[in-house]
Amino acid sequence: MKKNIITISREFGSGGRMIGKMVAEKLGIAYYDKEIIAKVAEKTGFAEDFIERSGEYSPSKSIFAYAVVSRDAAGSSMDDYIFSVQRKIILELAEKGPCVIVGRCADDILSDREDSLHVFIYGNKEEKIKKIMKTHNVSEREAAKLMKVTDKRRSINYNYYTDGQWGKVHNYDLCLNSSAVGFEACADAIVNLVK
Amino acid sequence: MKKNIITISREFGSGGRMIGKMVAEKLGIAYYDKEIIAKVAEKTGFAEDFIERSGEYSPSKSIFAYAVVSRDAAGSSMDDYIFSVQRKIILELAEKGPCVIVGRCADDILSDREDSLHVFIYGNKEEKIKKIMKTHNVSEREAAKLMKVTDKRRSINYNYYTDGQWGKVHNYDLCLNSSAVGFEACADAIVNLVK
């Protein structure tokens, strides 16, 4: 079966978002990233930056926060609510037709779809730090810290909401080291696989 | 730089060896697998099956075996000696020209070569078991056990002789799920990347 729904999970600084955009352009299909956040904001009434943090920061996953965060009678937090709305939106977007979806546990949410290809983009530490320094205009030390914290949070979020483990090969169909292969070649490898 | 030296690490039953052969054929370059064992046998005087076991079984890595296995004054075991000979042979083979090398920690041994591409082939449990049942003519239960034990041994061997962790994305440039992608498409993805 042709794989038309492409999910991209990625390490911070690996260029996964850029590669996702390139794939969508090369294939002439839809690209969803920030659009998902906007849609969740619209449905829930929460601010977009709050939703973005919820997807990657997940403060209520820590044991301490679990005690203090507001939860309803069923034990669900606001993060859980946002995740359930986001899940529904991702399922609807995939139903609409061929697309590239970046982040937001989309690989797990769409794992039952046979027409989906799940990609993980990672990179070498030094290359990722260089990229973060440039795109975020921060020092080497700050970039290294930002990388560590963001990936840790993505990992906690993914491991909490899915049965998989973030960054482990078995969650994905294809894993690419963008530092070794290059952004363009990563995009081409994905495009060739789905063609 | 063109990547002409391709190393393939693989889970048992994932078809990595077959994919490696396809890549070598498609690119018209040398393929090394059992040849390495024959060369090590020639240099060391040990039997080929003993060397093959040494590469994947590594009995002297267990704490118990460490106490009973024969070691020289420097604490080196026969496995260590075989590994050092094998390492030298892999470095020499890569020096000879473009090739595909399967297993034997070749990705780590050749990690300094900029003209090398390191691939990990993995698969879904059910698909791998089916393949092992067919190629080894064993029951489902036996295939599952064989898979678990072989991968465990490959992992112990790799983690002992390298600084990396077997099957973790960061050791490799490209990781492919042969069950999701298909053997032919895996080979094509590798070929396209090095072309």
Image (cartoon, coloured by chain):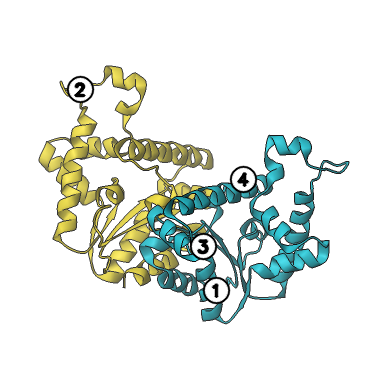
Chain colours: A yellow, B cyan
**Can marks 4 and 3 be said to lie on one chain?**
yes
Residue picked out by circle 2 = A71
What chain letter is assigned to the residue under label 1? B
Helix, strand or loop at disc 2? loop
Q: Which residue is mark 4?
A: B156
Q: Which residue is mark 1?
A: B21
Secondary structure of the residue carrying numbered label 1: helix
Q: Looking at the picture, does residue B107 appear above or below residue A128?
A: below
Mark 3, residue position: B136
Residue shown at 31% from the left, 40% from the top: A162
**Residue A10 rendering spot, x and y as whole percentages:** 39, 50
Locate residue B131: give its quadrant: bottom left
The three-letter code of the residue at mark 2 reads: Arg
Image coords of residue B139 (percent x, y): 45, 55
Work out how far the residue at label 4 is from the one at label 2, CA to CA, in angstroms: 44 Å
Query: How far is disc 3 from disc 1 in space, using C-alphas?
Result: 19 Å
User: Marks 1 and 2: same chain?
Assistant: no
How far across and how far down the image is residue B89, in percent? 75, 65
Q: Residues within 10 Å of mark 4 (few under 14, many from 20)?
A: some
- Mark in the foreground, 1 or 2: 1
Point out the tag, 4 or 1, that comes first from the N-terminus: 1
Nearest to N terminus: mark 3 or mark 1: 1
Residue type indicated by callout 3:
His
Is there any visible trace of residue B91 in the rendered image? no
